[in-house]
Image (cartoon, rainbow, N blue to C red):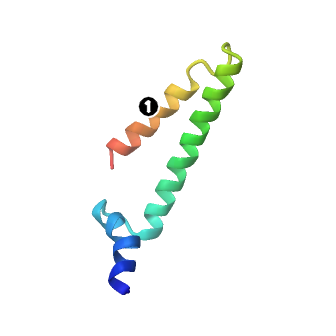
């Protein structure tokens, strides 16, 4: 059982040189950034003059964070 829990919870974070909670924090912040980008895209879809570059700028920012890990 411990081996299964280790694989589920700790193997991936270790593969990117992070602890469990460090990885949780990064992934949660990343998810929040995606939520912001998605929200801006929805606003832009309804009112095209708003948030014209917000979603794409946020996605570029998030991509940069992933590439620099």
Location of residue 17 in the rendering, given as x and y in whole percent from the top left corner: 31, 63
Tag count in the figure? 1
User: Who is closer to the viewer here, 41 or 4?
Assistant: 4
Location of residue 10 in the rendering, given as x and y in whole percent from the top left corner: 37, 72
Location of residue 32 in the rendering, given as x and y in whole percent from the top left corner: 58, 47
Q: Residues within 10 Å of mark 1 (few under 14, many from 20)?
A: few
SS class, disc 1: helix
Is 65 situated above or below 25?
above
Location of residue 24 in the rendering, given as x and y in whole percent from the top left corner: 49, 62
Q: Is residue 22 left or right of residue 18?
A: right
Q: Which residue is mark 1?
A: 60
Farthest right residue?
A: 47
Q: Residue at x 37, y 44 (%)?
A: 66
Q: Quadrant of the N terminus?
A: bottom left
User: Who is closer to the viewer here, 38 or 50?
Assistant: 38
Farthest top residue?
A: 49
Q: Residue at x 55, y 21 (%)?
A: 53
Farthest left residue?
A: 15
Res 14 quadrant in image:
bottom left
Is 32 situated above or below 47?
below
Is 66 situated above or below 19?
above
Res 13 quadrant in image:
bottom left
Q: Residue at x 53, y 48 (%)?
A: 31
């Amino acid at each position: 059982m411990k081996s299964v829990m280790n694989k589920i919870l700790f193997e991936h974070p270790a593969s990117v040189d992070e602890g469990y909670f460090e990885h949780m924090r990064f992934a949660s912040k990343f998810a929040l950034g995606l939520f912001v980008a998605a929200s801006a895209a929805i606003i832009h879809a309804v009112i095209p003059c708003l948030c014209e570059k917000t979603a794409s700028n946020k996605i570029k920012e998030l991509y940069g964070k992933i590439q620099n890990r």
